[in-house]
């Protein structure tokens, strides 16, 4: 599940619905499982998935978006306990 995207079958950047759609963890690396468990995921086609990982500004934009959405129903402290970094 994703706290932002209802439809995980189409790319959230370009709208592509055919082909392979990856479910990308917004907070990667050691935070991958935390991202999955908390819905910090987004559907991306392969091209946009590569763009996400190669464009720091794009990745930061989505980290901020997901943090903001999470903090609508949780505190900043709860977010920091999960991710250990403030992106806002």
Image (cartoon, helix red, strand yellow):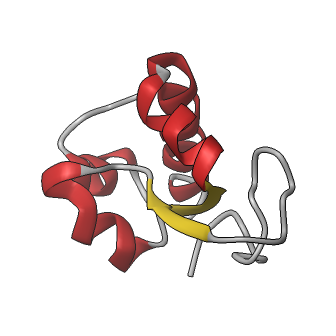
Residue 10 visible in the current orientation:
yes
Percent x, y of residue 29: 18, 50
Q: Residue at x 84, y 59 (%)?
A: 16
On screen, residue 12 versus residue 31, left or right, reads right
**On screen, residue 24 above or below 67:** below
Percent x, y of residue 31: 21, 56
On screen, residue 80 versus residue 43, left or right, reads left
Q: Residue at x 32, y 31 (%)?
A: 86
Percent x, y of residue 38: 40, 73
- Quarter holding the N terminus? bottom right
Q: Residue at x 58, y 53 (%)?
A: 46
Q: Nearer the viewer, residue 55 or 35?
A: 55
**On screen, residue 68 above or below 9:** above
Percent x, y of residue 2: 59, 72
Q: Residue furthest front?
A: 19
**On screen, residue 7 above or below 69:** below
On screen, residue 34 versus residue 61, left or right, reads left
Q: Nearer the viewer, residue 54 or 5?
A: 54
In which quarter of the view is residue 65 placed?
top right
Q: Nearer the viewer, residue 61 or 50?
A: 50
Residue 88 visible in the current orientation:
no
**On screen, residue 24 above or below 23:** above
In which quarter of the view is residue 68 placed?
top right
On screen, residue 35 versus residue 44, left or right, reads left
Q: Residue furthest left?
A: 30
């Amino acid at each position: 599940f994703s706290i932002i995207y209802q439809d995980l079958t189409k790319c959230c950047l370009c709208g592509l619905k055919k082909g392979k759609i990856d479910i990308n963890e917004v907070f990667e690396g050691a935070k991958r499982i935390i991202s999955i468990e908390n819905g910090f995921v987004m559907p991306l086609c392969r091209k946009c998935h590569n763009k996400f990982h190669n464009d720091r500004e794009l990745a930061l934009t989505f980290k901020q978006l997901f943090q903001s959405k999470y903090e609508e129903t949780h505190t900043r402290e709860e977010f920091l306990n999960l991710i250990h970094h403030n992106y806002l």
